[in-house]
Image: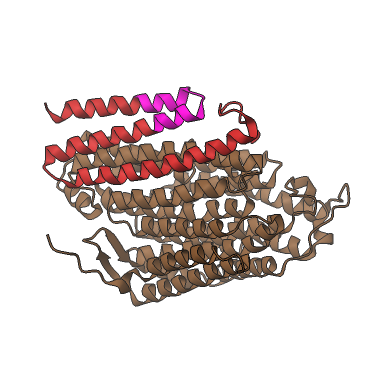
């Protein structure tokens, strides 16, 4: 047994996040430091880690660390960029949001950083146990964050629901790992792939694979494992709802993609049927229920369920095009979804949150800037050109058609039409309906507007110049 | 004894845990059933590890036990904070979020 040689340089993004988390924790001890400093430390640390990840993606890193347990490749770097962008955007919108309620702030940013670290481990994990540990680090931080406003009844309730269903899902995931360990004799992803290539398809492997699908299904909220999502999004602090809908979903898919297209590639005939059915169900149920929602956070929750279905369409293609289009879609989705939640935070009134869609009547005249930002995000979520949402959907659908899933793409296209109905309904309410009563709105907090501006620039930029973002995703799929 | 017996016992424990989560309504009992599921996986890990003569499976069990302990600490804290609001941990009565 030799001591592994650790190349610290390859672990830069993770190390920076760990260091930032320690600094935030220590700073929180000093009463004299303004609490918004903690947010800025988080943002600067994440930005440095983001810069390191971008550099490593450009340099084309391809290696592994800790005896092959952690893959440091372009695939993981692309996902780290998605997570860090989400973390920065969420920290930016959190500053004003937390100041309003005068809430404790130190733990908040510590937990966000820990969740980000967990996601990064999930994307890099080249060993099922490392993926499990990353998943748990992320999930445990998120349970606490969902219930962060302890004095608010719905927040605690959201925390409990998320905890019970999330831990239930972890049980399935872990048992799946145990069975795959039994079937393959190893938990290392490349070794499982080579064992399977030699033609051993033991029933243990198959059972383990289905349990993994159930575990991932809960984590990324696929129908029929989605019931927790609307409740948690509605009850959790809005910034955390934005966070849960973005990074963790991308992290779940990162591990999903790596395990299923790399380790379990030989079982493709078995899992592809399940994925196709889950994709069709997830899109249809998510979109149809979203049309019936009157609370905007619940509507966005069901819409995020539906978006997971679109990513599954790309996974069903199960080739390099499918994987790269899924990666681009997740990047696009994270930016536009956090943007939409930021607009929801901006639309809150002095006397608390107003989250009914009918409350948005007349917003187009009274808050023109806000209504414009929200409209751009919703149009992008609906997938109209020239926004990023269109580009994301286009590449996903094309990869699925190329792989021969014509019917799945037809269902996805019908679903896009259904989703346009409820996204545009909000736009119609904002611009064409008169408000029933006068509401007192907060003044525009500069930071929130800045975040929305960043998200809008991102959405338009990806929409206009998709090849700059798809290119890195395409070269990132060389991990087989 | 052969590996099958251990795996059968572990599958049985796992099933008991899943059924418990689905039919019991007390949040703490549900939580205990989830722990049962994790321990079923631990039993499978240890049995397979012995069968293969590969010690890594036994190391995984330590990781899982650590995760389970952290989960209990966080889980009980969240359940206590819900209890402070509602004086109950029955999941059917904790229902202010629905639609």
The spot of residue A136 in percent (x, y) is 40, 48
Q: Is B55 located above or below residue A42 in the figure?
A: above
The spot of residue A248 in percent (x, y) is 47, 53
Q: Colour of chain A?
A: brown
Q: Is A278 located above or below residue B28 in the figure?
A: below
Q: Residue at x 24, y 25 (%)?
A: B9
Magenta residue span? B16-34
Which chain is red in the rendering?
B
Residue A386 visible in the shown view: no
Q: Residue at x 27, y 47 (%)?
A: A264
The spot of residue A307 in percent (x, y) is 53, 50
Q: State the predominant SS element of the stretch in magenta.
A: helix
Q: Toward the viewer: A397 or A120?
A: A120
- Tell me which colouring the rendered structure shows: by chain
Q: Which image quarter is the N terminus of chain A in?
A: bottom left
Q: Which image quarter is the C terminus of chain A in?
A: bottom left
Residue A282 lies within the magenta run: no
Question: Is A1 on the left-hand or right-hand side of A365?
Answer: left
Question: Is B11 on the left-hand or right-hand side of A469?
Answer: left
Q: Is A305 located above or below residue B87 in the figure?
A: below
Quarter of the rendering containing residue A336: bottom right
């Amino acid at each position: 047994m030799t001591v592994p040689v650790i190349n610290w340089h390859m672990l830069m993004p993770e190390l920076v996040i760990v260091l930032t988390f320690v600094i935030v924790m220590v700073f929180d001890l000093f009463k004299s430091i303004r609490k918004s400093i903690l947010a800025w430390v988080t943002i600067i640390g994440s930005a440095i880690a983001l810069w390191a990840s971008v550099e490593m993606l450009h340099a084309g890193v391809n290696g592994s660390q800790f005896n092959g347990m952690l893959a440091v490749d372009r695939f993981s770097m692309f996902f780290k960029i998605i997570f860090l962008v989400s973390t920065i955007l969420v920290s930016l919108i959190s500053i004003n949001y937390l100041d309003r309620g005068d809430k404790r702030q130190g733990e908040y940013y510590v937990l966000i950083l820990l969740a980000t670290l967990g996601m990064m481990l999930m994307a890099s994990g080249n060993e099922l146990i490392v993926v499990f540990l990353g998943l748990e680090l992320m999930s445990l931080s998120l349970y606490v964050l969902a219930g962060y406003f302890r004095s608010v009844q719905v927040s605690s309730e959201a925390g409990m629901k998320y905890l019970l269903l999330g831990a239930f899902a972890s049980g399935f995931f872990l048992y799946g790992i145990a069975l795959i360990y039994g079937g393959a004799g190893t938990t290392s992803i490349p070794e499982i792939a080579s064992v399977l290539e030699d033609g051993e398809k033991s029933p243990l492997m198959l059972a383990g694979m289905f349990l993994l699908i159930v575990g991932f299904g809960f984590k990324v909220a696929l129908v029929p494992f989605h019931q927790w999502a609307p409740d948690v999004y509605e009850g959790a602090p809005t910034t955390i709802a934005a966070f849960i809908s973005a990074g963790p979903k991308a992290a779940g898919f990162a591990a999903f993609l790596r395990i299923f297209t790399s380790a379990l590639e030989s079982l493709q005939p078995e899992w592809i049927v399940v994925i196709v059915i889950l994709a069709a169900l997830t899109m249809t149920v998510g979109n149809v229920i979203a049309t019936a929602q009157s609370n905007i956070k619940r509507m966005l929750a069901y819409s995020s369920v539906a978006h997971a279905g679109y990513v599954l369409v790309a996974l069903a293609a199960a080739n390099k095009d499918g994987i790269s289009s899924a990666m681009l879609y997740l990047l696009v989705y994270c930016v536009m979804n956090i943007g939409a939640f930021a607009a929801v935070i901006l639309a809150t009134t002095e006397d608390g949150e107003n989250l009914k869609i009918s409350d948005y009547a007349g917003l187009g005249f009274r808050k023109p800037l806000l209504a414009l930002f929200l409209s751009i995000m919703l149009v992008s979520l609906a997938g109209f050109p020239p926004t990023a949402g269109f580009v994301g959907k286009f590449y996903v659908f094309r990869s699925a058609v190329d792989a021969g899933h014509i019917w799945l793409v037809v269902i996805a296209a019908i679903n896009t039409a259904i989703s346009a109905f409820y996204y545009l309904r909000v736009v119609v309410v904002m611009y064409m309906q008169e408000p029933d009563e006068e509401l007192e709105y907060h003044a525009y907090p500069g930071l929130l507007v800045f975040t929305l501006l960043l998200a809008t620039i991102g959405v338009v930029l990806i929409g206009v110049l998709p090849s700059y973002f798809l290119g890195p995703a395409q070269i990132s799929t060389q991990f087989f | 004894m052969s590996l099958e017996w251990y795996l059968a016992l572990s599958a049985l424990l796992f099933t008991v845990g899943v059924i418990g989560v689905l039919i019991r309504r007390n949040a703490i009992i549900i939580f205990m059933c989830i722990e049962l599921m994790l321990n079923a996986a631990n039993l499978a890990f240890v049995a397979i590890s012995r069968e293969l003569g590969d010690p890594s499976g036994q190391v995984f069990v330590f990781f899982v036990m650590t995760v389970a302990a952290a989960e209990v600490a966080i889980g009980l804290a969240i359940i206590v904070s819900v209890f402070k609001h509602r004086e109950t941990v029955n999941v059917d009565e904790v229902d202010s979020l629905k639609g």
